[in-house]
Image (spheres, grey):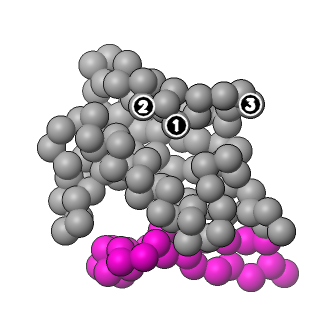
């Protein structure tokens, strides 16, 4: 049976302990990253939407780095938006900067009505190279 290993990015474990979940779980060579949001250092939402999306990707990168992998190791992305009609072009623009070349990871975008004060969240599955 594979053991699960919790992964936490540097200087952010308190936020995860407060809400009792892990930033990511490693199982074998797979990394399952919890939804990352564009939070400020104190855990509150970044008010500017584009900056919030960029911070979410920065928090994602920090979690991937803590597990020994990076953006190129992502195989599946799920994003959540509170107002897709208004926000989607901004999300696409940021995503296209980060994933500028094929092959692109799988991507599912979902519209939701609540993200605990945030407007964007991203969760991924990545493969950790041996």
Q: Quadrant of residue 82?
A: top left
In the image, residue 38 sits, relative to residue 13, either above or below, namely above
**Gap between marks 3 and 2 measured at Cα:** 17 Å
Residue 44 lies, in percent from the top left, at 18, 59
Instruction: Choose the circle earlier in sequence order: 1 or 3.
Output: 1
User: Quadrant location of residue 54?
Assistant: top left
- Where does residue 110 sit, x and y in percent of width and height? 46, 32
Q: Residue at x 35, y 77 (%)?
A: 11
Tag shown at residue 103: 3
41 on left or right of 59 = left
The structure residue drawn at horizontal position 58% and vertical position 41%, both measured from the top left corner, is 77
The residue tagged 1 is 98
Q: Is residue 15 magenta?
A: yes
Between marks 2 and 1, how big is the CA–CA gap? 6 Å
Q: Badge 2 local density, few (<14 within 10 Å), some, or many (20+)? A: some
Between 99 and 49, the residue placed more toward the observer is 99
Report the residue marked by disc 2: 94
For the record, the magenta segment spans 1-28
């Amino acid at each position: 049976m594979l053991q699960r290993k919790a992964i936490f990015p540097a200087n952010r474990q308190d936020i995860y302990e407060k809400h009792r979940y892990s930033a990511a779980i490693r199982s074998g060579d797979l990394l399952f990253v919890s939804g990352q949001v564009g939070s400020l250092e104190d855990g509150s939402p970044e008010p500017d939407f584009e900056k919030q999306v960029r911070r979410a990707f920065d928090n994602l990168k920090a979690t991937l780095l803590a597990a020994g992998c990076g953006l190129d190791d992502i195989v599946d992305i799920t994003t959540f938006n509170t107002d897709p009609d208004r926000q989607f072009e901004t999300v696409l623009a940021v995503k296209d900067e980060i994933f500028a070349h094929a092959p692109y990871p799988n991507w599912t975008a979902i519209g939701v009505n609540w993200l605990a004060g945030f407007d964007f969240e991203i969760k991924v599955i990545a493969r950790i190279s041996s």
